[in-house]
């Protein structure tokens, strides 16, 4: 009577082992399927590895550019548009505009304070305006970094080390000169401000589509440059513009 019991016990043990193996196979296959369903990591625009908010500094300035607070962002854009209209359409000058604005503000506040004291009411409380130091420091550091990088690019291009970068810089300067001939400096500055105030938030909403398109465009540009280098640049007397080794 002991043999059937042992056979039954061994069969139940084998069934448990088979169930565990089957469960492991199912879990592993489901995990692999879930891994395959995860989106692959694609190269972001300009090699970006951080979110757009972090690239822009991650502070209040980034919140304003990305319209985290729509009232403040819209107010800044409306103010800039109003100033541009005053200077471009009405022919205002900067010093005249500042003086007239201060004169009007001081006159209104003076009359308001005098009227409140005459009717036995508390005078208006003027808020203490203190400009944040962090904002100006971050702007200064960003400008310093961009200016230093521009100087480094010009130095490398002038040294004759990278013909591709030379063509890119010359093309960019030519486009900027053509655009600058169409508008005044104030209008160009306003257009740049509007672009910086609208393009980042649009890019953040559609970054996957833009990155895919930019990647394809860069591949096509590299192909065209390779054709140009093979057919034209390498036939020039200077060769492929490589830096000569100094012995």
Image (tube, rainbow, N blue to C red):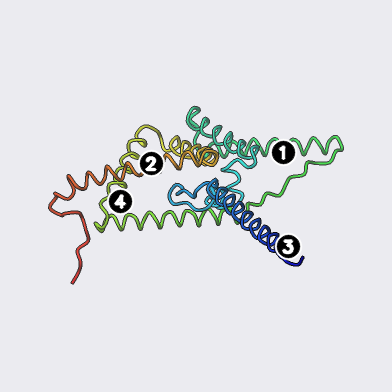
Outermost residue toward the front? 1
Name the residue that disc number 2 marks. Answer: 216
Q: Separation of disc 1 and disc 2 at Cα?
A: 58 Å
**Looking at the picture, does residue 195 appear above or below residue 156?**
above
Outermost residue toward the top? 89
Observer-nearest residue: 131 or 13? Answer: 13
Q: Separation of disc 3 and disc 4 at Cα?
A: 84 Å
At which x and y percent is residue 49?
50, 53
Residue 17 circle label? none
For the point 49% across and 50% down, the residue is 41
Q: Residues within 10 Å of mark 2 (few under 14, many from 20)?
A: few
Name the residue that disc number 3 marks. Answer: 4
Q: Separation of disc 1 and disc 4 at Cα?
A: 56 Å
Do the residues under discs 3 and 4 have CB atoms within 8 angstroms?
A: no
Outermost residue toward the left? 237
For the point 67% across and 57% down, the residue is 15
Outermost residue toward the right? 120
Residue 7 placement: quadrant? bottom right
Residue 109 circle label? 1
Name the residue that disc number 4 marks. Answer: 165
Q: Residues within 10 Å of mark 4 (few under 14, many from 20)?
A: some
For the point 25% across and 59% down, the residue is 159
């Amino acid at each position: 009577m002991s043999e059937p019991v042992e056979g039954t016990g061994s069969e139940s043990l084998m069934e448990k082992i088979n169930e565990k193996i089957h469960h492991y196979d199912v879990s592993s296959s489901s995990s692999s399927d879930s891994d395959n369903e995860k989106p692959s990591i694609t190269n972001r625009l300009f090699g970006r590895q951080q979110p757009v908010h972090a690239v822009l500094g991650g502070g209040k300035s980034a919140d304003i550019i990305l319209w985290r607070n729509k009232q403040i962002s819209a107010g800044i854009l409306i103010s800039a548009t109003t100033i541009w209209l005053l200077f471009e359409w009405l022919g205002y000058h900067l010093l005249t505009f500042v003086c007239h604005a201060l004169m009007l503000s001081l006159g209104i506040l003076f009359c308001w304070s005098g009227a409140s004291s005459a009717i036995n009411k508390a005078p208006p409380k003027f808020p203490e305006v203190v400009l944040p130091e962090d904002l100006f420091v971050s702007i200064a550091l960003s400008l310093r970094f961009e200016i230093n990088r521009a100087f480094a690019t010009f130095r490398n291009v002038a040294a004759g080390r990278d013909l591709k970068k030379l063509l890119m810089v010359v093309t960019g300067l030519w486009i900027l000169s053509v655009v600058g001939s169409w508008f005044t400096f104030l209008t160009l500055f306003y257009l740049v401000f509007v672009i910086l105030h609208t393009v980042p938030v649009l890019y953040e909403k559609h970054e996957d589509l833009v990155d895919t398109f930019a990647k394809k465009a860069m591949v096509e540009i590299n192909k065209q440059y390779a054709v140009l280098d093979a057919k034209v640049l390498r036939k020039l007397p200077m060769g492929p513009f490589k830096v000569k080794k100094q012995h």
